[in-house]
Image: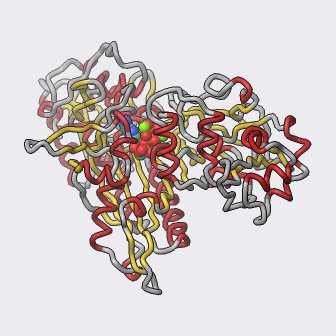
């Protein structure tokens, strides 16, 4: 592409409202412009990077067995009412009425749409599993849009959904998608970690986030310096002071049996008054935290002692109930303790929400919930994991790092299929809810995360696989015919050989061209200047700054 014909509005000054490097540079280098808060136009160079990220995403999704489709952005309120999220999703959901007064939302995510689609089409286990994805603009009215594309109100997401007849089938697909995510972010050149995550408003079970390591990340990751343990701190184990209840700990064996059905059994077994059970039954036994809870006359109907790291999976109240409870009784905060200690009772969530957490803001995402600050004072002995704590898996010491969430995989289970009647007939002809997984990638956020990890004082430094072009050819002085001749011949030759070339043929001063070229950050720059007559050009590697002279005919061989 000839640069003279391309829309690349570069800026010398740092835009006042851009706090972080990627945001500043994507604006300055002419990759995007803000239209309104959290809303951007992606300009030609930015669009090329996005397309490359999308290509990587498509290749890896196809490889993982997901097939691309496209669902509507306009979503009927009825679907969201069926799932219960019309009321629970909160103000992030952008709502409007059509001319007939029917209520709609602009899709922030597509569980409802995809579940309604599949429930009408898939009747038998023979048609399962299925895995579909789309790449599409999503809308979320974020409270604090910021950092450019990192947190927009309109952004591009890849979202995939899988449907299964069995849990094993979901496990297999989850693994394949997990591996696909690893490959995607590796191919993007990102330094990232997969961490145990918070299922937030999704109401899921197993879930991991893919975090790009970066000081400006909004999430904090707790990881072990010796093992693979890594978790979002909002999700990492709460460390409890168990001394209070330790005299009861030895009795745990008695509690954790299928015979302990009611709160009475528990209180008897532990010799604790029934009313106090809620507050008392937090134990640490052999390095495992166990919380035994039940509501007055409710049964403890699923007593299990699970591996510590699985504790966050144990959400014995069905996910939709959890959400209802949170919504109607507290209005905001999620079941933090459920995910951080073992819960051995149905309806535990309600107690935890009522008894331990306090509401601290709209929406029940747990970000920013802080034991000690948000919890009642006498529960201040529950705290998040901290740097220097022993890793929950027993190997190594916990360290913290900041991360940008670029991807998120969930085992949703039957949360949506149950609420929306998405059933299939199993081998025995019985109707069963489809078991679901969902898998998101912030495509535009990924582009910004790459820019955040790849820049220097002069501008962006794109990794080759996502750079808008492979080579920047610069004719230093377009008034000199020998320069433009050599430069345009090289431009054509390189393109013939399959390279993507940006050719700076503008009548600008050399200083402007070089500064723009550094800002834009293509991997290789070939400068055609004074020695053009002798067929000598200068090659510069953007990443290392290394530069050397070469004969123009050698150039194609020098670029990989
Ligand atoms: P966050 O915690 O940053 O608000 P999320 O957990 O709400 O993100 P998900 O619902 O998991 O987001 O959506 C899938 C992916 O979409 C995220 O992993 C992230 O990469 C991307 N994403 C979410 N919100 C935004 C946004 N406002 N702007 C850009 N990308 C986003
Ligand atoms: Mg969010
Ligand atoms: Mg998140
Ligand atoms: Mg997420």
Q: Where on the picture, by quarter, is residue 153?
A: top left
Please indicate whether residue 182 sits to the left or right of residue 248 in the image.
left
Residue occupying image coordinates x 13% and y 30%: 4
Residue 75 point in image, percent of width and height: 23, 49
Let me know if residue 56 appears in the view.
no
Q: Of residues 192 and 503, which is closer to you in this image? A: 192
* Colouring style: secondary structure
Q: Where on the picture, by quarter, is residue 71?
A: bottom left
Q: Of residues 363 and 161, which is closer to you in this image? A: 363
Residue 32 point in image, percent of width and height: 26, 30
Residue 298 point in image, percent of width and height: 65, 54
Please indicate whether residue 278 sits to the left or right of residue 543 in the image.
right
Residue 481 point in image, percent of width and height: 12, 30
In the picture as drawn, the residue positioned furthest to the left comes out as 99
Q: As displayed, is residue 168 above or below residue 503?
A: below
In the picture as drawn, the residue positioned furthest to the bottom comes out as 428
Residue occupying image coordinates x 68% and y 54%: 345
Q: How many marks?
A: 0
Q: Where on the picture, by quarter, is residue 23?
A: top left
Please indicate whether residue 235 sits to the left or right of residue 405 in the image.
right
Please indicate whether residue 189 sits to the left or right of residue 373 in the image.
left
Residue occupying image coordinates x 85% and y 39%: 245
Which part of the image, by quadrant, shows the N terminus?
top left
Let me know if residue 482 appears in the view.
yes
């Amino acid at each position: 592409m000839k640069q003279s014909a391309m829309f690349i509005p570069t800026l010398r000054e740092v835009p006042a409202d851009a706090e972080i490097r990627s945001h500043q540079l994507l604006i300055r280098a002419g990759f995007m412009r803000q239209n309104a808060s959290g809303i951007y136009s992606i300009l030609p160079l930015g669009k090329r990077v996005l397309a490359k990220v999308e290509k990587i995403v498509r290749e890896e999704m196809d490889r993982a067995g997901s097939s691309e489709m496209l669902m509507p952005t306009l979503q009927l309120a009825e679907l969201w009412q069926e799932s219960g999220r019309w009321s629970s999703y909160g103000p992030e959901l952008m709502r409007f009425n059509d001319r007939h007064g029917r209520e709609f939302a602009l899709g922030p995510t597509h569980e409802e749409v995809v579940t309604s689609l599949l429930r009408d089409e898939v009747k038998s286990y023979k048609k399962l599993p299925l895995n579909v994805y789309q790449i599409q603009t999503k809308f979320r009215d974020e409270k604090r849009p910021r950092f450019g594309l990192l947190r927009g109100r309109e952004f591009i997401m890849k979202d995939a959904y899988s449907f299964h007849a069995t849990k094993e089938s979901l496990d297999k697909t989850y693994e394949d998608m997990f591996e696909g995510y690893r490959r995607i972010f590796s191919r993007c050149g990102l330094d990232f970690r997969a961490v145990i995550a918070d299922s937030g408003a999704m109401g899921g079970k197993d879930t991991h986030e893919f975090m790009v390591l970066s000081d400006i990340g909004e999430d904090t990751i707790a990881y072990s310096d010796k093992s693979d343990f890594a978790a979002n701190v909002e999700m990492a184990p709460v460390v409890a002071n168990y001394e209070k209840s330790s005299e009861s700990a030895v009795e745990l064996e008695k509690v954790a049996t299928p015979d302990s059905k009611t709160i009475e059994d528990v209180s008897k077994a532990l010799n604790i008054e029934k009313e106090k059970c809620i507050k008392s039954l937090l134990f640490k036994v052999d390095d495992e935290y166990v919380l035994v809870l039940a509501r007055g006359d409710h049964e403890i109907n699923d007593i299990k002692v699970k591996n510590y790291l699985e504790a966050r999976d144990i959400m014995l109240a069905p996910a939709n109930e959890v959400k209802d409870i949170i919504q109607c009784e507290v209005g905001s905060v999620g079941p933090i303790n459920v995910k951080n200690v073992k819960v051995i009772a149905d309806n535990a969530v309600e107690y935890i929400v009522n008894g331990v957490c306090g509401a601290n803001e709209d929406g029940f995402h747990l970000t920013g919930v802080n034991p000690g600050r948000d919890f009642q004072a006498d529960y201040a002995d529950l705290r998040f994991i901290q740097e220097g704590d022993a890793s929950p898996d027993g190997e190594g010491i916990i360290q913290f790092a900041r991360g940008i969430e670029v991807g998120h995989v969930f085992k949703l289970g039957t949360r949506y299929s149950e609420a929306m009647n998405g059933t299939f007939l199993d081998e025995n002809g019985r109707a069963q809810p489809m078991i679901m997984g969902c898998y998101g990638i912030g495509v535009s956020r990924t582009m910004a995360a790459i820019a955040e990890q790849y820049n220097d004082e002069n501008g962006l430094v794109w990794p080759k696989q996502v750079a808008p072009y492979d080579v920047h050819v610069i004719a230093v002085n377009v008034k000199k015919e020998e320069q433009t001749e050599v430069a345009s011949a090289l431009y054509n030759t390189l393109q013939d050989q399959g390279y993507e070339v940006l050719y700076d043929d503008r009548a600008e001063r050399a200083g402007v061209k070089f500064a723009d070229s550094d800002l834009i950050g293509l991997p290789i720059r070939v400068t055609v200047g004074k020695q053009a007559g002798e067929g000598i050009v200068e090659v510069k590697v953007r990443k290392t700054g290394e530069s050397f002279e070469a004969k123009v005919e050698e150039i194609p061989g020098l670029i990989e």
